[in-house]
Amino acid sequence: MDVLEIAVSLAQEAGGLLRERLDAPRDIQEKHARDLVTDADRASEALIVGRLHELRPQSSILGEETGVTNGSNDERWIIDPLDGTTNYAHRYPVFCVSVACEQAGQLVAGAIYAPMLNEIFAAGLGRGATRNGQPITVAKTAEVRSALVCTGFLPGHGERNMQNFVRASCEAQAVRRDGSAALDLASVACGRFDAFWEFDLKPWDVAAGVLIVREAGGVVATLEGDAWQLGAASLLATNSTLQQPMLRLLRDPL
Ligand code: IPD
Ligand code: CA
Ligand code: CA
């Protein structure tokens, strides 16, 4: 299996585990105030990490729940075993598994599996992006007023997020806050969202999604309009036509 096939197979296997456990009794804890983790997050990550130890024993791993496992080569797997944990905890069926592979610091493969939608999004560097095996592209929407846009924010991260939410609500066709950054990026990649932005995302939230958006013809920048890289403090994913109008919308004073 190549790295893309591995990413797809791990995301699907872990997503199956999440789907099976969704209606079962669960153990829900707070890592920090209103930042949840469930037994399913941990089981999903244990499954993925265990498989990676078998399949790619020399690689490093960065997983949300287990942190860093150092390897001996320049390959790193970046995993969000359950993106959308608050949704999952409430049985709101919008969540996914995100698995990305980086080689020598470059994202080369990414897979996002949304088990309740049975959608597997995948991309390999230079190989395009797919949903359930079919090629996808970002939307062609050219004006903010025709755009369905999405954002996310952590509880308590107030003012700028609220300002941007109000701005977008006034200017765009509609705004969603769907609770799974990785799936939000996949939705930009396949054209059902025209833009997605968020501050303070972690590498595991976005590594696979950014590659999938780019391979679907989209662009990713910081909200300051700078080049985006893993670890950046903000992210805006759009098609190339909407990028500047969205940056202006989210930057200009109210
Ligand atoms: C969260 C989700 C949410 C986003 C948060 C993330 P988690 O990830 O992606 O949509 O707004 O910033 O932390 O905790 O569900 O894996
Ligand atoms: Ca996440
Ligand atoms: Ca998570």
Image (cartoon, grey):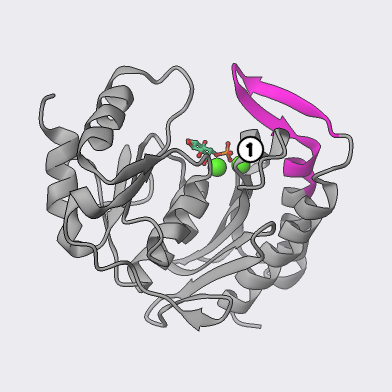
Determine whether the beta carbon of the residue marked 1 sits less than 8 angstroms from the nearest atom of ligand 1.
yes
Q: Quarter of the image holding residue 89? A: top right
Mark yes or no: residue 70 visible.
Answer: no
The kind of residue tagged 1 is Asn
Query: Which of the two residues, 106 or 199, is positioned nearer the viewer here?
Result: 199
**Where residue 167 sits: x, y (%)?**
22, 31
Identity of the residue drawn at 40% across and 79% down: 128
Give the answer, above or below, for where 232 lies relative to 12: above
Give the answer, above or below, for where 43 lies relative to 242: above
Asked if the stretch drawn in magenta spans residue 31, the answer is yes
Is 24 positioned to the left or the right of 168 in the image? right
Q: Quarter of the image holding residue 153? A: top left
Q: Which residue was labeled with disc 1?
A: 87
Mark 1 packing: few (<14 Cα in 10 Å), some, or many (20+)?
some
Asked if the stretch drawn in magenta spans residue 216, the answer is no
Identity of the residue drawn at 28% across and 57% down: 238
Please identify the quadrant where the N terminus is shown. bottom right
Give the answer, above or below, for where 127 lies relative to 202: below
Mark yes or no: residue 99 visible.
Answer: yes
Identity of the residue drawn at 46% across and 51% down: 184
**Where residue 66 sits: x, y (%)?**
68, 41
- Which stretch did the figure color magenta? 26-43
Quadrant position of ligand 3: top right
Is 193 positioned to the left or the right of 32 in the image? left
**Where residue 181 sits: x, y (%)?**
48, 46
Give the answer, above or below, for where 123 lies relative to 74: below
Query: SS class of the residue under badge 1?
Result: helix
**Where residue 199 sits: x, y (%)?**
35, 35
Please identify the quadrant where the C terminus is shown. top left
